[in-house]
Amino acid sequence: MKNNMKIIPLLCAVITSVALAREQPNIILIVADDLGYGDTGVYGSDIKTPNVDRLAASGVRAIDAHAASGVCTPSRYAMITGQYYYGNWNGELLVEPERGTIATVLKDNGYKTGYFGKWHLGWGQNTEGRKYRADIDWNTTLPAGVLESGFDYFFGTPFSHNESPMLFVRNRDVIGLEADDPISVIGPKDPGGAPHGKSFGGEKAHAARPTDRIDLVVVDEMVEWIKENKDDPFFATFCLVAPHVPLAVAKEFQGKSNAGVYGDYIMQMDDCIGQVLDTLDELDLTDDTLIIFTSDNGAVLHQHAVSLGHHGNGVLLGQKTDAWEGGHRVPFIASWPGQIPEGETTDSLISLIDLCKTVWAAAKITEWPATAATSSVNQLPALLNPKGESVRDGVYALGTSGYIVREGEWVYIPRQGSGGLTLPANNHWTPVLYTLGFDNSDYDENLELKPDAPETQLYNLTEDLSQSKNVIRDHPEKAEMLQQKYAQFMKSMSQEYTQKLQRRKLKQD
């Protein structure tokens, strides 16, 4: 009898612990690399993506979600920090952990945190004379990076998978490194350098990261981490390298799609997502897990895929790098069984900069550093009630030539062209638009800017989602109001960057 009396309180404690864990859901953020708005089945593609479609069937799909940038590093910075990006990057760690990141706040509130896949947010400090990643010593423990940004564990690639050094890193150590075969890296401006640097030595370290199997190796590591942390609430970020170039497809996925190697790569990506979903099912964690799936920016319009009838960004004008919608409108799916409705669609305006406060709200976290995620808003109400009103009135997004302003149905671009590499004509980024047959009123049939084209652009996305007609001359008052909003935003960004530089200088001194 005495033994039973001891068991009952213990059992109650276990039950209470499980109940508390379920109050804080596991959170998994899955980010594809350069996956377009029209690249998956549920968004209208003929490429088979059963696991992305399965995720959408169990949750809410957004049709007006936007990355904070048309290229990966500023976009990822915004996701991690809840802040817009401004300034220059020299390969240093961009994230300021002392301000609070999506992961540090979750970690401070009892979550295990893991990061898997592509990092691409830098390492170490930006010191005078630094030559990008070439100045990092890859033969010893790496400087500040993923772990200092709030993650307990890291396994993945230090930059993009087409950038040197092409290695796997676990926490702060290069996988497969041998003392008698050191790694050296030269920068893009060094003699013999490549656009993203070039690495030498480290034969086994480089061989440990097979280009065609990066995501497949990473997902195995992530699955094991989930199993090890299944008894605690966890936050796992899975940043795939697909379908970013090089389009390196594992043998078992080659020739599987109707969109060439690009489609095959997306199917390989989808299989990796399926492995995560299957693991949650096997561990009976699906109902206790919030999953958000998205992309860091729009798709690159690969000519071979377009020639086979596939348009990665659907009806959207432009592609990766651009300020046009194709550069930053992205797929976005959220699933949380029993909480988020199944199989619904929302037209609420969403920015990936909102991830911080959205997942904190899901985790019932109400306090964080005052300087953290100041540009983020909580989108959980829009996900729980997809037919309700939009939480946001507007967003900003960055092309490679600067920011744009979105407010309601209107988008203002304070310059001519795509705001990226598509137009004005830029080598291989441009010709595909001829094949697609897109029209834009500022350009003639040869994609030459018309002599009388306005200096800036304004589009009504409700009436003209493909941005075929620049209506800025028809709505001067709307354009003026958005121009003022843009100027105020850029002033605040400049002030914030100045303060950041001052903090960095004080830290170095």
Image: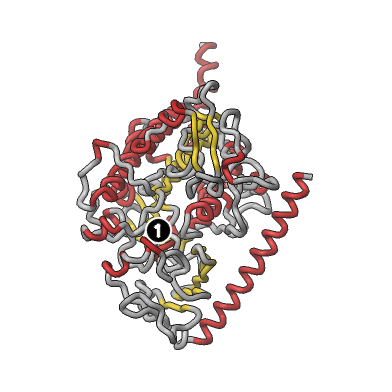
- The residue at the point 56 percent across, 46 percent down is 190
Is residue 221 or residue 92 the one in the foreground?
92
Q: Position of residue 457 (x, y in %)?
A: 47, 78
Q: Position of residue 233 (x, y in %)?
A: 50, 36
Q: Is residue 382 visible?
A: yes
Figure colour scheme: secondary structure
Is residue 210 or residue 397 the one in the foreground?
210
- The residue at the point 53 percent across, 86 percent down is 477
Numbered label tally? 1
* Image position of 372 with respect to 17: above or below: below
Q: In this image, 386 relative to 362: left or right?
A: left
Q: Position of residue 456 (x, y in %)?
A: 50, 79
- The residue at the point 49 percent across, 41 percent down is 198
Is residue 34 or residue 352 the one in the foreground?
34
Q: Amino acid at mark 1?
A: Gly
- The residue at the point 58 percent across, 36 percent down is 147
Q: Specify the quadrant of the image occupied by residue 249.
A: top left
The quadrant the C terminus occupies is top right
